Amino acid sequence: SSHVSSTLLFAGGFGTAKSKSAPKKKANKKSKSSILSDIQVDEAPKQSTPKLDRFGLPIPTEDDIFPPLTSNDGARVPVSDGDEFNKEDVAEALQHHIGVNLDIFDENGQSIHEEKSNRWKLKLLHQDPPVLSVEHFFSEADVEQYKSMIESNEGNNGGGNGDAVQLSSPTFSSSLSLSRRTSTTWFCKYESMSCLLAKAQALLNVDLKQMEEPQLVRYRTGEEFSWHYDEIPSAQLSNGGQRLATLLVYLNDLDKDRGGGTVFRDLKSPVNESNKRKEKGSSKGNDNQLTVRPKSGTALVFFPAFKDGKADPRTLHKGEVALDTKMIAQLWIHEKEYQASVPENNLQVDAASGVREELERLGVKNVM
């Protein structure tokens, strides 16, 4: 895809890029005969001069780093608002991705695991590329457990015996990057996140060894994570290969006027007649961007790459500026076995027994 040639920005890190200097034009001496042409030029819009960094190189624009999609990037197909859940539609949407374990859902999208008090509700938010939500993915007890982990590991930068290592995240502040991440992230020990891992395994039917370090993220008032891709730059694919799935779970609610939504730049919200009328009467191109509002316990699932590892630029997204505190738990699934780097001695196998117990408690069977 065309975006790979630009600075590749992804959640959890950043790539490198080179920018070429704009060719310099020689100044032309004006003659008397140019007066009339000068007057005519003044009537036309002036082209803005590109801003330069301290090395005299053009600072990349948003379109340089996040190029507009082309027909080569694939179709974008929203779902129709009001459509009832259809397992065949979901299966079709997921045919080129690692997918979702549809065997644990009935024909109405309700989970059929044995823990009846906390049924999941699967919903297709976008057809191609597929974006899904799972309501009630976390129980209230799950949510409180992970919120308390954030509080108990506040300020833990690697010392002590905490369950997580705290990292401040303004990692994209160079002149070669337009992404801003001002939240705080905790990289967690696998064994402390068995609930998330078990439910991720049940939902996506993947091996624990494919899972990246589970993370907890907090956005305070005014914090954000601007446009970025979740894919891994090609130079860093040796550890686990490409990220095939993003799973994040909101740990609190945020109303629409309080920001904090997850926004997909190039995807549209479910289509209905009201949206169609709005688009016809509006000059703005982003009025109907697919935006998922934080709702406590709800999971959001999308796929930064196809199951063959090819990155999908259509999943460019951002975390809106939050006007209240926003908290999430998140997990990425890789193509192959992934080796964690933080916290120290963090191994997926340490969570295996806790994950089995959680799957048994849920009553979910036939998962990897």
Image (tube, rainbow, N blue to C red):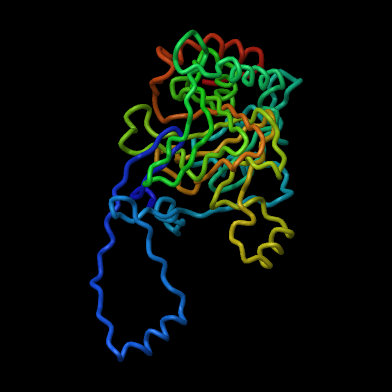
Q: Position of residue 39 (x, y in %)?
A: 42, 86
Q: Which residue is located at x 70 percent, y 44 percent?
A: 256
Count of labels in the image: 0
134 or 177: nearer the eye?
A: 177
27 or 107: nearer the eye?
A: 27
To which quarter of the image does residue 10 belong? top left
Q: Is residue 324 positioned above or below 159 on the image?
A: below
Q: Position of residue 326 (x, y in %)?
A: 63, 32
40 or 347: nearer the eye?
A: 40
Q: Is residue 86 positioned above or below 363 on the image?
A: below
Q: Which residue is located at x 38 percent, y 51 percent?
A: 1
Q: Is residue 263 positioned above or below 221 on the image?
A: below
Q: Position of residue 2 (x, y in %)?
A: 37, 53
The furthest residue to the right? 117
Q: Position of residue 292 (x, y in %)?
A: 64, 42
**Horizontal side, residue 119 vs residue 158: left or right:** right
**Horizontal side, residue 140 vs residue 200: left or right:** right
The furthest residue to the left? 26
